[in-house]
Amino acid sequence: MKKFVLDTTVYIHAMRDSEAGSELAAWQRRMAPRIYQHAVVISEILIGAKDEVTLERWRRRWVLPSEQLRRVITPSYACWLRAARTVTRLVAAKQVQRSHVRPSLVNDCLLAASSHEHGYTIVTYNTADFALIARVDRGVTFVATLP
């Protein structure tokens, strides 16, 4: 049975578009046993909060259910090394410039490494970054729509 981890872009889209939010909620209800949260995504979501009240509201809405179910994954040391290797390979392949490596790309490399380690498929609307990562890390599995 395929398991999934959602990228931050899925949540951002759901926050900005009520129809997308409804679609995501329905998909999450259907797929609940197969969905995991990633610590990097949690951090990215919560960093976007304008204040602590919003942070706590988002945490209750988007994070707490996964915490309660113990469905939060974190990058292992091996994942940090794999992410560093991925960035190095991208630079060596001239896909990115070392001086222009975005923190969000590093986060996506961590998400990709952890998802590969656990055998999860990433659900993302940021296909550009994950396609780039997949060029140098063949173990990355991602989809661009809610399966």
Image (cartoon, rainbow, N blue to C red):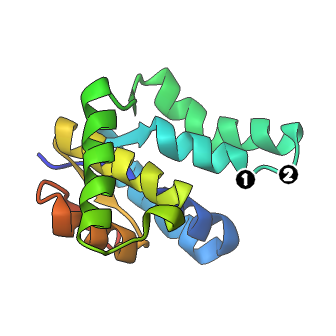
Q: Where residue 99 is drawn, which disc sits there?
A: none
Q: Nearer the viewer, residue 82 or 28?
A: 82
Residue beneath the point at 57% across and 37% down: 63
Residue 52 visible at all? yes
> What residue does disc 2 label?
50
Q: Residue 72: give x, y in percent of width and height.
A: 42, 30
Residue beneath the point at 85% across and 51% down: 50
Residues at circles 2 and 1 in contact by the CB criterion of under 8 Å = no
* Mark 2: few/some/many CA within 10 Å (<14, 14-19, 20+): few
Q: Residue 69: give x, y in percent of width and height.
A: 43, 24
Q: Amino acid at mark 1?
A: Gly
Count of residue discs = 2
Q: Secondary structure at mark 2?
A: loop
Q: Where does the N terminus fall, quadrant-wise?
A: top left
Q: Where does the C terminus fall, quadrant-wise?
A: bottom left
> What residue does disc 1 label?
48
* Mark 1: few/some/many CA within 10 Å (<14, 14-19, 20+): few
Q: Amino acid at mark 2?
A: Lys
Q: Secondary structure at mark 1?
A: loop
Q: Residue 146: give x, y in percent of width and height.
A: 34, 67
Q: Nearer the viewer, residue 39 or 145?
A: 39
Q: Nearer the viewer, residue 68 or 41?
A: 41
Residue 10 visible at all? no
Q: CA distance from mark 2 to mark 1?
A: 6 Å
Residue beneath the point at 29% across and 51% down: 112
Q: Is residue 145 above or below residue 58?
A: below
Q: Is residue 130 above or below residue 60?
A: below
Residue beneath the point at 55% across and 73% down: 20
Q: Residue 91: give x, y in percent of width and height.
A: 32, 65
Q: Is residue 55 left or right of residue 147?
A: right
Q: Is residue 111 above or below residue 146?
A: above
Q: Is residue 24 left or right of residue 63?
A: left
